[in-house]
Image (cartoon, rainbow, N blue to C red):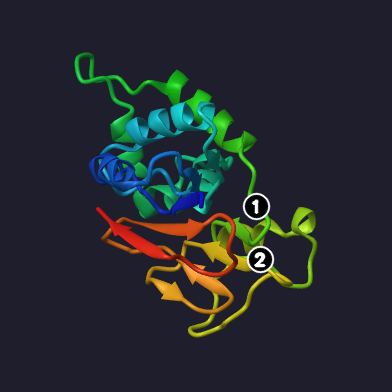
Amino acid sequence: MGKVCVITDIHGRLTELWRLLDLMPDDAKMIFLGDYIDRGSQSAEVVALMRLLQQDGAVCLRGNHEDMMCSPDTMGGTWMANGGSATVESYRDPLSGEVNVGLMERDAAWFESLPRVHSDAHRVYVHAGVLPLEALDNQPEAITQWFRYTAGADIGWRDKHVVHGHTPGIVQLANRTCLDGGKALCCGVFDDDVAGGPVEMLWA
């Protein structure tokens, strides 16, 4: 039986990400729910790895922190107050001390190319949330990127289980799973052929 491994809210933690990748079952499908950057010290390195994994077939979604970096006021207070300064530092050349603006722009263009929602036979994957009565291709960005479910809200999308991050705290309900471990990076392992939540949780 195939496995689907889902990670969200990496936030520049390359070391922890590598630990989770090493723990994943062989040949597992990989889905990443966004927020690759900010707060941690290795955002640029995480993005480089994400781009390689995408080339190998991984699904990479866009999170709200990627949206902040891509917004017109990128260097403004909102992004910088939410970890953006650490991201800028990660693009700084260790020898010259100069920020690699060209690489930041190329990565920002990649962020803008990423989808906000992904689905398979049993589940819907998104960074923050989905409206249960709205078609997946018509979900507002305010929901997919920024929505926070109320505590205990057991809401899926129609007959599918919703897997998301964005709201710190692991939640495992009948119709919804949140995988944002906050300070501890984790990976939810799902059976590809069986509906429902994770069958295993991996921790960095």
Percent position of residue 16, x then y: 25, 46
Instruction: Give neighbour class at mark 2: few <14, some 14-19, many 20+ (Cα, 10 Å).
Output: many
Residue 33 visible here: no
Residue under label 2: 130
Q: Amino acid at mark 2?
A: Val
Q: Is residue 54 above or below residue 195?
A: above
50 with respect to 21 (left or right): right
Percent position of residue 169, x then y: 37, 72
Q: Nearer the viewer, residue 151 or 40?
A: 151
Q: Amino acid at mark 1?
A: Val
Q: Quadrant of residue 203?
A: bottom left
Cα separation between marks 2 and 1: 9 Å
Instruction: Give neighbour class at mark 1: few <14, some 14-19, many 20+ (Cα, 10 Å).
Output: many
Q: Is residue 177 above or below residue 60?
A: below
Percent position of residue 145, x then y: 58, 57
Q: Nearer the viewer, residue 26 or 154?
A: 26
Identify which residue is drawn at 30% across, 32% down: 90
Residue 117, which numbered label? 1
| Kind of element beneath mark 2 | loop
